[in-house]
Image: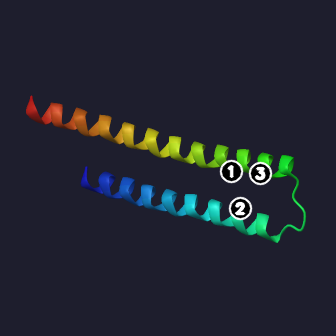
Amino acid sequence: MIASQSAVKKYVADMEAYLACIVDAEKTAVASMEELTPEAEQQRTEMLDKKYNAAVEEMERMAADFNAEVQAYKARDNS
C-alpha cells in the first residue's frame, strides 16, 4: 500500500508538471505569433482548457480510485 501511495504521489507531481508545461507552451506559442485573431485566440484558449481539464479529471479519478482501495484495505484490516 505504501508503494502504491508513493506511485500516486509521483503521478500527481508529474501531472502538475505537465499542467504547468502545457500552460507555458501555450503562452510561448501565442507570444511568438505575429497576428492572432480574437477567434483564433478563443479557439486556442478553449483547446488549452480542454487539455488542462482532462488532465485534472484524470488526476481526480486516480485519487478517487486510490482512496477507494485504501478504504477497502482498511475495511479488510478492521474485520
Mark 1–mark 2 CB contact (< 8 Å): yes
x, y (%) of residue 55? 56, 47
Q: Which residue is mark 3?
A: 44
Mark 3–mark 2 CB contact (< 8 Å): yes
Q: Residue at x 51, y 57 (%)?
A: 15
Q: Is residue 27 left or right of residue 5?
A: right
Name which of mark 3 and mark 2 comes first in the sequence: 2
Q: How is the image coloured?
A: rainbow
Name which of mark 1 and mark 2 comes first in the sequence: 2
Label 3 to label 2: alpha-carbon separation = 8 Å
Q: Residue at x 77, y 69 (%)?
A: 31
Mark 2 element type: helix
Looking at the rendered structure, the kind of residue marked 1 is Leu
Mark 1 element type: helix
Which quarter of the picture shows residue 53? Answer: top right
Q: Which residue is mark 2?
A: 26
